[in-house]
Image: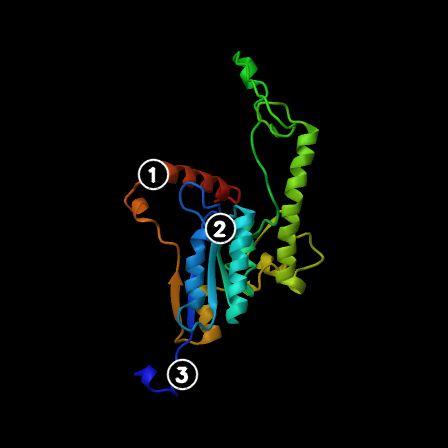
């Protein structure tokens, strides 16, 4: 009936895209957030019907910087094309790449206990230079190219390898900082060191300019677009073979990897 009466205003429609979990490339075993998987979800959210705005619900400890960049860039391209505001809502965490995703929004809202930030890049591993010799094992490695055995865990760490690793990490960190500065601009507290990998909780993130306020999805969107607002959820659907339990080994590895990433933030 409402559609037949042209002067009756339709309630606002806000698609809600859930971005939950580790951010990883499409070749990774198990589920994960990546541009290839999310592209159809994001495209439908922006293009289907006549949305008033788009909301992102983010709960991610981070992961791949490239996938974070690709996903955030896709959201911004569609937002600019459709001229739609984008609102981000953080649940447990928007850390590292998870915060990169949040910066795709025009404003960021957090829970008082949300963890936000971790604007840095990390490379972690183990070293076992004496393990093989202790057990009488001789390792034979032959390379064409002096850098092919870079950061070999069975060799002592070399200063030149560490310097090369930092040469790889620093440009990624610079790209992350540029993204945050471009999207948050003057809202950032310039008197603080925000790009050292630290995290902030709730109101502290707001005070630092990394978020815009304390707020939850439904009440905040209703305050913006009215009580009759329609929220339409979008998310990644698990493939049928995963729903049936096929591929459990890959899922177990993925879960262990993701738990290790969450553990950095005490979850």
From the image, tell me which residue sits under label 3: 9
Circle nearer the N terminus (1, 3): 3
**Marks 2 and 1: CB-CB under 8 Å?**
no
Q: Residue at x 61, y 50 (%)?
A: 119
Which of the labelled discs sits on residue 60, or is there none? 2
From the image, tell me which residue sits under label 1: 248
Residue 8's image quarter? bottom left
Q: Position of residue 197 (x, y in %)?
A: 62, 47
**Residue closer to the observer: 11 or 202:** 11
Q: Position of residue 113 (x, y in %)?
A: 51, 55
**Residue closer to the observer: 203 or 131:** 131
Circle nearer the N terminus (2, 1): 2
Question: Would residue 115 be visible to someone looking at this image?
Answer: no
Q: Residue at x 56, y 48 (%)?
A: 65
**Residue closer to the observer: 146 or 46:** 146
Asked if residue 191 is positioned above or below residue 136 in the image, the reply reads below
Q: How is the image coloured?
A: rainbow
Residue occupying the far front of the picture? 144
Please name which of the two marks, 3 or 2, marks the residue nearer to the observer.
3
Question: Would residue 143 be visible to someone looking at this image?
Answer: yes
Circle nearer the N terminus (3, 2): 3
Q: Position of residue 220 (x, y in %)?
A: 47, 69
Please name which of the two marks, 2 or 1, marks the residue nearer to the observer.
1
Measure the C-alpha gap from mark 2 to mark 1.
Answer: 22 Å
Measure the C-alpha gap from mark 3 to mark 2.
Answer: 37 Å
């Amino acid at each position: 009936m409402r559609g037949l009466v042209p002067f009756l205003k339709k309630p606002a429609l806000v698609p809600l895209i859930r971005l939950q979990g580790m951010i990883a490339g499409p070749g990774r075993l198990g589920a994960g957030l990546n541009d290839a998987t999310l592209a159809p979800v994001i495209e439908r959210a922006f293009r289907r019907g006549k949305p008033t705005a788009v909301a992102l619900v983010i709960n991610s400890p981070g992961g791949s910087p490239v996938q974070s960049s690709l996903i955030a860039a896709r959201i911004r391209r569609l937002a600019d094309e459709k001229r739609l505001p984008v609102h981000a809502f953080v649940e447990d965490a928007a850390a590292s790449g998870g915060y990169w995703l949040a910066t795709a929004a025009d404003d960021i809202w957090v829970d008082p206990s949300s963890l936000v930030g971790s604007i840095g890049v990390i490379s972690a591993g183990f070293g076992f230079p004496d393990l093989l010799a202790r057990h009488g094992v001789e390792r034979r490695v032959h390379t064409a190219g002096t850098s092919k055995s870079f950061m070999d865990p069975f060799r002592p760490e070399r200063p030149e390898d560490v310097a090369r690793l930092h040469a790889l990490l620093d440009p990624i960190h610079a790209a992350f900082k540029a993204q945050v500065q471009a999207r948050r601009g003057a809202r950032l507290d310039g008197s603080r060191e925000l790009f050292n990998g630290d995290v902030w909780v709730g109101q502290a993130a707001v005070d630092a300019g990394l978020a815009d306020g304390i707020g939850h999805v439904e009440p905040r969107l209703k305050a913006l677009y009215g009580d009759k607002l329609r929220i339409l959820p979008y998310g990644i659907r698990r493939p049928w073979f995963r729903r049936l339990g096929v591929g459990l080994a890959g899922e177990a590895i993925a879960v262990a990897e993701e738990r290790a990433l969450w553990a950095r933030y005490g979850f």
